[in-house]
Image: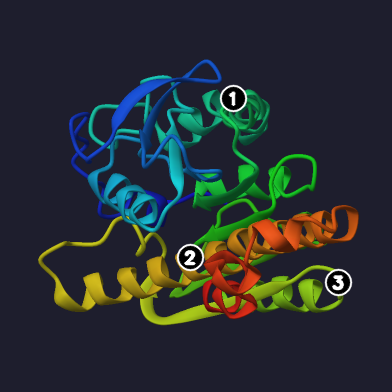
């Protein structure tokens, strides 16, 4: 299912790009950005070009600026796909299987939880999308986004247990619009799973991270997808935090009659339900 579209517009990798830094997380070199005190994390899993892609790190920084702690692991162990002079794509894919990516993602998620993270969203691009659908179980993450996915099947979508957003491209031989529509139908049949599916017109596979920064229309399309991704995580992850706070306050009110005297609910900004609604 991989092909030329996976290799189109390859990024110029830069290990020094981004506002964050690289550290070990779950045994993998990982680009991390955002406040380490945040209780909400977003895991980004790259396409075949790896975690040093400047546009990917720029997106990570953008998500971090919204209040999330963001992790972008190097699932390729310093060996991203290189079109010129590297291994043939199919051979490289065999050496960097998505099943291995799934197994290596588990300790990364555990490491995030050990930092005090209470909710995790995960997004995958191309190759990374297949890893995400395997992670899209309640025991691992709380929300997921697939962007121009590769290798993903309808059966994968049927197995998803957490809210899922799929952002597809009109020009995509790996996940053509007809297949994305099948994904949507499978999600619609799962009433217990929130979902959002969108096909972007006039863009090609990889448009969200392999765009030309000097092409105004390409930047605009990519930023629209980034905004959709961020809105999805804000809706699902922040909503959970707000509800947890509300439940805690209600419990305190029920158990301790003194609590209302020492804490003014009217003065508590985070108590207001409309605060949660604006974030969700």
105 lies left or right of 8:
right
Q: Are marks 2 and 1 in contact (CB under 8 Å)?
A: no
Q: Which residue is mark 3?
A: 190
- Residue at image position (45%, 49%) is 68
Looking at the image, is 237 positioned above or below residue 138? Answer: below
| Residue 97 x, y percent position in the rendering | 59, 31
Query: For the residue carrying disc 1, how many other residues have a C-alpha within 10 Å: few (<14), some (14-19), or many (20+)?
Result: some
| Residue 119 x, y percent position in the rendering | 64, 47
Depth-wise, is mark 1 or mark 3 nearer the camera? 1
Marks 1 and 3, the one that precedes in the sequence: 1
- Residue at image position (65%, 27%) is 110
Q: Which residue is mark 2?
A: 229
| Residue 58 x, y percent position in the rendering | 27, 50
Looking at the image, is 264 positioned above or below residue 56? Answer: below
- Secondary element at image label 1: helix
- Residue at mark 3 to residue at mark 2: CA–CA distance: 21 Å
| Residue 212 x, y percent position in the rendering | 18, 62
- Residue at image position (39%, 55%) is 63
Depth-wise, is mark 3 or mark 2 nearer the camera? 2
- Secondary element at image label 3: loop
The part of the image, by quadrant, that contains residue 94 is top right
- Residue at mark 2 to residue at mark 1: CA–CA distance: 23 Å
Query: For the residue carrying disc 2, how many other residues have a C-alpha within 10 Å: few (<14), some (14-19), or many (20+)?
Result: many
Residue 111 - label? 1
50 lies left or right of 276:
left
- Name the outermost residue toward the bottom: 201
Marks 2 and 1, the one that precedes in the sequence: 1
């Amino acid at each position: 299912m991989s092909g030329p579209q996976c290799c189109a517009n390859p990024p110029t990798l830069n290990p020094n790009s981004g506002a964050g830094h690289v550290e070990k997380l779950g045994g993998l070199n990982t680009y991390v950005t955002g406040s380490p005190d945040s209780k909400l994390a977003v895991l980004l899993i790259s396409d075949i070009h790896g975690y040093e892609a400047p546009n990917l790190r720029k997106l990570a920084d953008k998500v971090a600026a919204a209040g999330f702690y963001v992790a972008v692991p190097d699932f390729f162990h310093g060996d991203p796909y290189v079109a010129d002079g590297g291994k043939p794509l199919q051979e490289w894919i065999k050496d960097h299987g998505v099943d291995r990516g799934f197994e290596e993602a588990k300790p990364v998620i555990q490491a995030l939880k050990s930092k005090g993270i209470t909710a995790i969203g995960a997004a995958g691009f191309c190759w990374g999308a297949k890893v995400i659908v395997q992670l899209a179980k309640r025991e691992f993450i709380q929300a997921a986004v697939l962007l121009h996915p590769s290798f993903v099947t309808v059966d994968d979508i049927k197995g998803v247990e957490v809210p899922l957003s799929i952002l597809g491209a009109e020009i995509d031989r790996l996940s053509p619009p007809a297949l994305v529509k099948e994904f949507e139908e499978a999600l619609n049949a799962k009433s217990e799973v929130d979902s959002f599916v969108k096909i972007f017109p006039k863009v090609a596979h990889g448009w969200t991270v392999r765009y030309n920064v000097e092409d105004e229309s390409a930047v605009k399309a990519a930023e629209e997808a980034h905004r959709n991704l961020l809105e999805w995580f804000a809706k699902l992850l922040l909503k959970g935090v707000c509800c947890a706070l509300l439940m805690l306050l209600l419990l305190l009110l029920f158990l301790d009659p003194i609590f209302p005297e020492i804490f003014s609910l009217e003065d508590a900004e985070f108590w207001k339900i409309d605060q949660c609604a604006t974030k969700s």
